Image (tube, coloured by chain):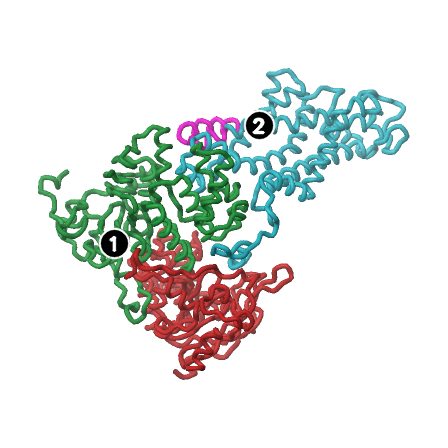
Chain colours: A green, B cyan, C red
């Protein structure tokens, strides 16, 4: 069975603005696959390129290089008509659900909009499909005639989820979809997301900066740092035995909601701050902050490679450095 | 400042089956827009006033008691209320009411038509520049900048000079002059709407370029454009009079409201009504358009519905 | 802990706004004390009134929101009774505040060193040169590398974490006894958050100031707080030392909040049992206990009785009649 979503070596750079130094390398050579019913968590701090990666996967922006395949079909090179058809299979839920809804359309129309844009069904059919989905996400029929500004953040997120579902996609990308929500509302939405997955066998790409949330919902986790995926493996593995020093640092910095287990003095601190992901020369992007920096880290960029019996990591502590002749390249 | 705690009032339950009945029963689609507009008293009155003024101007041949150009040398400077001349006469003894009615035909055309034409053209250019980006944007905007650089009246004079003087020349010149103003506004509005997350959401759902433009961007660009355009109408009535004054617009003895103000100015002491009456009409019509614009904008915006 | 430790005592604080002729309470009879050298956390969801409480203490509310009752005693002196001029001398000097969004709290067109120096000069008689020198020292103290050069930079030259350090430097410039930090790390990445938390805790220890930490993040509370007040719908519903609060919570809301907090051990197969519903609109608070419509333990009395915050042990108070009765029976 082909993977539902496959990104191979996808890159995206933004050219420098006039007189503004070097360009920005938002995503560099990212690859991952997503199978039916699976959740891949994409974890990273602000500016690491995770949202760019989401938009590349949806072809909302065009990659500089690499390919995106949806259900085995080439998405990157697809014609306008084919792109439109493939969009039915991959949908997205944004962080700011409220402004991702058209303020001039009622919620019912907003939910039905993807059907209309795809030319599916009559007005009546679309309306009844929208009502059905609003019910599915825990809203009532009368909500359909209200406007987005009348909704709270959690409700707007439910509406956005209903809209993402109406085309019966195979994959839904969640871009920081629960990050702006309060704790109790966040739990409700997470529960809804998990229930829907079970019910429809959906595949999720779940993007967040919050390791707790990502771990809560994912089968596998990909950790991003400055445009690169630096570690990818089973969620429990990543949490229990992280391989990349950055993942370790990230884990150590998270305060645990239990004062007996962790007080502020035990919070791990990693040197420095993430530089902006400039279109830099060779070398590991994390090396300046890394406690295990070696000579080779300055010379070559580690690739994401499987470690025997474990998971994939891009770090010379665990993977062999490239042969010397490649260093010059 | 509205405290953040109350900002989400209205609907605040998260759970299925919670409470939170709408304060106003939902009226679907166009119904509530009309209803919202009617509830906005200022806009409603403005609309009525404008309909009356436009109707009167249209029916000027039937309503005018006199020929607007017919001078009565024996009855000059007659104040309003004079028998036979409801609004009095001007310095040449012409009936004010008739002149206002006939003048309205010119003033309304000069005020409304160029603004409408320029809005349509400006909207198209603004949408093009704002959504196409790149060189199309650059070229369009630089062309508009060139037009901008000419002083408004100078440009109108140049155009009117090439064409033959008359009302339609006036319309063409004012239209051309207005396009860069409206175009700029439309482009800015387009850029701001186009950057909204709901546009990206529509793209992800498979919206075609045409659908994005017509169904998503344009409805967001129209309201600010509408407000701007309606404020321009009054201004253009005055600009039109300026052109007439320079001999480029309507030709005497025909006249418009602005020209009447200008003619009356000479005899302001002797016959204030000759200036004040057309002046009041211009102010009233300008204000009415302004209120109408605000009212339409609010009626188009679901967020203003539940105040 | 004796009474001399108390630096600030808030009693029955009510903050309200009048909407349509009706008084809406955003903060409702809130009481707590801040002690020397200790960290008190106020935890709650958005709209619970935690930020309003902080703004009320400093009298920074924007009309028409106003303090409608209660006292805020700083070393026994009621801040709410001071003139605006007297209050200005306290604010920033004796009680300082660190906001969530450091970019918004800094002036974009003034150099960082100058801004900190201005705070100093507002409260201390100092020459500009002295103040600027002190500003550099402060920046160095809060861990801004290359402080001398950075003092000459503008806010937009700084990263989010560094800006928060700048704000903290400004807050401690006059040696305050109370530091109020309102969601100081919410806008920051987790690795940066860890550093800022270290810094705040270090400063508290060093200066023995009392820290009032306002946050929605239970992880941050567990790491930082000595005492915790949980707010819901404008009320303090439970108050306890940090260990008791996390390990023996009495209020159903506290328990629900802890259940919603994500534990790193949990995975997608762990049951997730969120509380239904959302906090009430302050204009339409339910009768009795504001939490009763969402409460799993509610009894018919909860609809009727508005529970007061009552001590159930030496270190714990709770505003829940069910919990209070259970403790009384035990």
Report if residue C99 lies within the magenta region: no
- CB under 8 Å between discs 2 and 1: no
Task: Decide: is B92 above or below B270.
Answer: above
Provide the residue designation for mark 1.
A235
In the displayed structure, would residue C49 be above or below residue A34? below
Looking at the picture, how far across and down is residue C297, in whole percent?
A: 45, 69
C169 with respect to C59 (left or right): left
Q: Residue at image x 65%, y 28%? A: B112
Residue A310 location in percent, x, y?
Answer: 16, 52
Place residue A236 in its image quadrant.
bottom left
The kind of secondary structure the magenta stretch mainly shows is: helix
Point out residue A329 in the picture as x, y percentages from the top left corner: 15, 38
Q: Residues within 10 Å of mark 2 (few under 14, many from 20)?
A: many
- Looking at the rendered structure, which numbered label has been put on residue B118? 2
Q: Give the left or right position of residue A329, taking residue A200 as reference.
A: left
Chain identifier of the residue bearing label 1 in the image: A
| Residue occupying image coordinates x 29% and y 57% | C267
Question: Along the line of sight, which residue is nearer the eye, C110 or A90?
Answer: A90
Question: In which quadrant of the rendered image does the N terminus of chain A lie?
Answer: top left
Answer with left or right where residue A312 lies relative to residue A146.
Answer: left
Residue C209 appears in the picture as rendered: no
Q: Nearer the viewer, residue C15 or A21?
A: C15
Please state the extent of the stretch shown in magenta in the rendering: B125-148
Tell me the subunit letter for badge 2.
B
Q: Is residue A327 left or right of residue B140?
A: left
């Amino acid at each position: 069975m082909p993977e539902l979503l496959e990104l191979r070596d996808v890159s995206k750079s933004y050219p420098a603005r006039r007189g503004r130094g070097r360009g920005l390398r938002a995503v560099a050579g990212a690859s991952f696959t997503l199978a039916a019913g699976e959740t891949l968590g994409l974890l990273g701090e602000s500016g690491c390129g995770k949202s760019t990666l989401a938009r590349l996967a949806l072809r909302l922006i065009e990659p500089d290089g690499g390919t995106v395949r949806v259900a085995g079909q080439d998405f990157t090179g697809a014609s306008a008509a084919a792109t439109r058809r493939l969009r039915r299979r991959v949908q997205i839920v944004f962080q700011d659900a409220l402004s991702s809804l058209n303020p001039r359309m009622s919620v019912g129309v907003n939910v039905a909009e993807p059907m209309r844009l795809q030319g599916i069904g009559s007005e009546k059919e679309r309306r009844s499909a929208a009502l059905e989905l609003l019910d599915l996400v825990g809203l009532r029929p009368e909500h359909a005639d209200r406007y987005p500004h009348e909704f709270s953040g959690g409700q707007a997120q439910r509406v956005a989820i209903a809209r993402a579902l109406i085309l019966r996609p195979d994959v839904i990308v969640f871009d920081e979809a629960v990050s702006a929500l309060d704790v109790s509302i966040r739990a409700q939405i997470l529960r809804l997301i998990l229930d829907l997955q079970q019910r429809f066998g959906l595949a999720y790409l779940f993007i967040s900066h919050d390791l707790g949330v990502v771990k809560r919902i994912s089968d596998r986790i990909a950790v991003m740092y400055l445009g690169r995926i630096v570690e990818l493996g089973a969620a429990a593995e990543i949490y229990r035995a992280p391989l990349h020093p950055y993942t370790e640092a990230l884990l150590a910095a998270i305060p645990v909601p239990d004062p007996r287990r962790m007080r502020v003095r035990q919070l791990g601190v990693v040197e420095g701050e993430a530089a902006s992901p400039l279109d830099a020369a060779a070398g590991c992007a994390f090396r300046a902050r890394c406690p295990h920096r070696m000579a080779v880290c300055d010379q070559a960029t580690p690739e994401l490679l499987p470690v025997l019996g474990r998971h994939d990591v891009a770090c010379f502590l665990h993977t062999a450095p490239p042969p010397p002749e490649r260093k010059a390249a | 400042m509205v405290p953040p705690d109350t900002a989400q009032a209205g609907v605040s339950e998260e759970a299925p089956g919670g409470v939170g009945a709408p304060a106003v029963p939902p009226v679907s689609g166009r119904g509530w827009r009309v209803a919202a507009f009617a509830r906005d008293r200022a806009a409603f009155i403005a609309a009525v006033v404008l309909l009356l003024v436009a109707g009167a101007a249209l029916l000027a041949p039937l309503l005018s008691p006199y020929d607007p150009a017919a001078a009565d040398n024996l009855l000059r400077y007659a104040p309003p209320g004079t028998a036979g001349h409801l609004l009095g006469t001007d310095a040449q003894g012409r009936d004010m009411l008739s002149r206002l009615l006939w003048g309205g035909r010119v003033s309304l055309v000069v005020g409304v038509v160029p603004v409408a034409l320029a809005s349509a053209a400006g909207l198209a250019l603004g949408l093009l520049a704002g959504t196409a980006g790149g060189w199309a944007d650059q070229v369009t905007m630089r062309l508009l900048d060139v037009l901008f650089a000419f002083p408004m009246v100078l440009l109108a004079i140049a155009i009117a000079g090439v064409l033959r003087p008359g009302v339609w020349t006036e319309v063409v010149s004012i239209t051309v002059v207005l396009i860069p103003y409206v175009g700029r506004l439309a482009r800015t509005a387009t850029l701001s709407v186009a950057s909204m997350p709901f546009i990206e959401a529509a793209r992800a759902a498979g919206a075609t370029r045409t659908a994005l433009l017509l169904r998503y961007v344009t409805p967001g660009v129209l309201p600010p454009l509408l407000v701007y355009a309606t404020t321009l109408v009054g201004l253009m009535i005055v600009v039109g009079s300026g052109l007439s004054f320079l001999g480029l617009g309507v030709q005497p003895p025909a006249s418009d409201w602005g020209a009447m103000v200008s003619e009356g100015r000479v005899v302001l002491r002797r016959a204030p009504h000759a200036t004040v009456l057309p002046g009041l009409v211009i102010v009233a019509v300008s204000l009415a358009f302004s209120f109408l614009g605000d009212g339409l904008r609010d009626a188009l915006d679901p967020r203003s519905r539940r105040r | 802990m004796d009474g001399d430790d108390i630096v600030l005592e808030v009693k029955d604080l009510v903050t309200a706004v009048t909407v349509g002729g009706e008084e809406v309470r955003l903060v409702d009879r809130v009481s707590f004390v801040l002690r020397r050298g200790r960290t008190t956390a106020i935890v709650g969801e958005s709209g619970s009134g935690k930020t309003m409480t902080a703004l009320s203490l400093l009298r920074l509310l924007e009309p028409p929101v106003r303090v409608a009752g209660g006292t805020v005693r700083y070393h026994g002196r009621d801040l709410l009774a001071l003139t605006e001029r007297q209050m200005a001398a306290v604010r920033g000097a004796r009680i300082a505040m660190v906001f969530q969004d450091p970019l918004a709290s800094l002036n974009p067109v003034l150099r960082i060193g100058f801004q900190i120096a201005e705070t100093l000069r507002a409260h201390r008689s100092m020459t500009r040169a002295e103040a600027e020198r002190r500003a550099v020292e402060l920046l160095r103290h809060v861990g801004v590398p290359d402080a001398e050069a950075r003092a000459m930079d503008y806010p937009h030259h700084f990263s989010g974490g560094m800006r928060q350090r700048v704000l903290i430097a400004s807050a401690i410039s006059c040696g305050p006894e109370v530091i109020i930090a309102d969601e100081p790390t919410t806008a920051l990445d987790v690795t940066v958050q860890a550093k800022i938390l270290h810094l705040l805790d270090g400063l508290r220890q060093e200066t023995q100031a009392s820290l009032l930490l306002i946050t929605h993040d239970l992880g941050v509370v567990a790491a930082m707080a000595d005492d915790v007040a949980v707010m819901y719908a404008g009320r303090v519903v439970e108050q306890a030392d940090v260990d008791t609060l996390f390990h023996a919570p009495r209020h159903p809301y506290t328990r629900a909040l802890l259940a919603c907090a994500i534990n790193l051990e949990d995975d997608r197969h762990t049951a997730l049992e969120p509380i239904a519903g959302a906090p009430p609109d302050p204009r339409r608070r339910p009768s009795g206990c504001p939490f009763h419509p969402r409460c799993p333990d509610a009894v018919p009395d909860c609809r009727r009785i508005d529970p007061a915050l009552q001590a159930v042990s030496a270190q714990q108070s709770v505003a829940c009649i069910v919990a209070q009765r259970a403790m009384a029976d035990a």
